Amino acid sequence: CENMLIQEFKEDYIMSIFKGAGVAIVTPMKPDGEVNYEAFAKLIEFQISNNTDAIIVCGTTGEASTLTHEEHIECIRFCVQQVAKRVPVIAGTGSNCTQTAIYLSQEAQKAGADGLLVVTPYYNKATQKGLKEHFKLIAQAVEIPMILYNIPGRTGGVNLLPETIVSLCEEEANIVGVKDATDNFIQYAKLMALAKGKVDVYSGNDNQIVPFLSLGAKGVISVLSNIAPQQTHDICAKYFEGKVEESARLQLEAIELVSALFSEVNPIPVKKAMNLMGLEAGTLRRPLTDMEDATAAKLEQAMKNYGIL
């Protein structure tokens, strides 16, 4: 009976937060490392005017790991206010400390975020049981929908297994999906087979958007969208319109650029690319440093080849 009520709640209220291409937006910084809110407003307007489907604030690309709690919450609040309900705003609120993740998630809800993106806890290397308890406690502390974020490459190899993801979505009404950045397509296929429509899946890799869509994903949470929001939106929109060949063509055209955007650790290359375009992403917070000259030259050439520079 309880599971039936949870499923009805999902269907009536929170499935899905968004469909299409959501940008994992950078946090622009001034030369002294402070958050540049004037530039942030311009980046948000650039995204909305180029048909981005959602804005994901304070994620990996937003350098959330080097923001203070106060800055983190203020960036979410600022983004929500600037967007003003024109597209969904999803706040990254994950932490390796469950209580910290609960605190950030509650503050994001207070700030008006439409949903949460919560990464698997890093460093602790929790078991599947620990991961499940972690996410359930966060979900139970808020009312807005939550997307799990599975990215073993950033979390010491911690991998949220398909069975755990499906179980969480079945047991907690506001856990609605997952951003999959595992680079393991077999695991993704298993997840989709087990999910049976109960899990909203988003690709976490810009080079795998169409393959993910082909098995039923709702879209992508994208780094590429920072510099090519319309094009990334179109990859998804064309697919959903049934224009699969056109969608695949757009995906393949972006492959060289996507590769260049990950030639150094994210968000180093994407901030470089944005600055080359005059989008004023600014500097990076340490321990991240500016892009090496050789990879920066390849990035610039890829941007020219793609036609955005």
Image (spheres, helix red, strand yellow):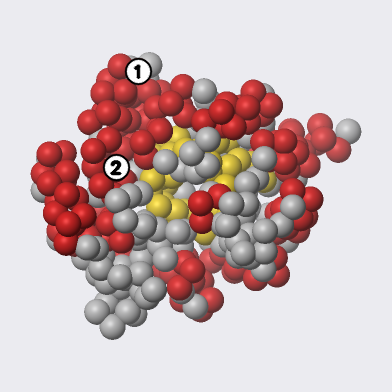
Name the outermost residue toward the front.
294
Name the outermost residue toward the right.
1
Left or right: 166 with respect to 47? Answer: right
Looking at the rendering, in which quadrant would you find the N terminus? top right
Is 108 placed above or below 212 here? below
Residue located 40% across and 62% down the image: 62
Instruction: Tell me the mark number nearer the camera, choosing from 2 and 1.
Output: 2
Is 240 placed above or below 131 here? above
The spot of residue 190 in percent (x, y) is 63, 27
- Front residue of 131/107: it is 131
Residue located 37% across and 30% down the image: 236
* For marks 2 and 1 on the same chain, the one whose residue lies earlier in the sequence: 1
Question: Real-space Cα distance between discs 2 and 1?
Answer: 20 Å
Is 260 placed above or below 243 here? below
For residue 7, say whether it is visible: yes
- Front residue of 84/35: it is 35
| Amino acid type at image mark 2 | Val
The spot of residue 98 in percent (x, y) is 70, 65
Which residue is disc 1 drawn over? 244
| Amino acid type at image mark 1 | Val
For residue 10, say whether it is visible: no
Which residue is disc 2 drawn over? 258
Residue located 75% across and 38% down the image: 167
Check disc 1 and report its element: helix, strand or loop.
helix
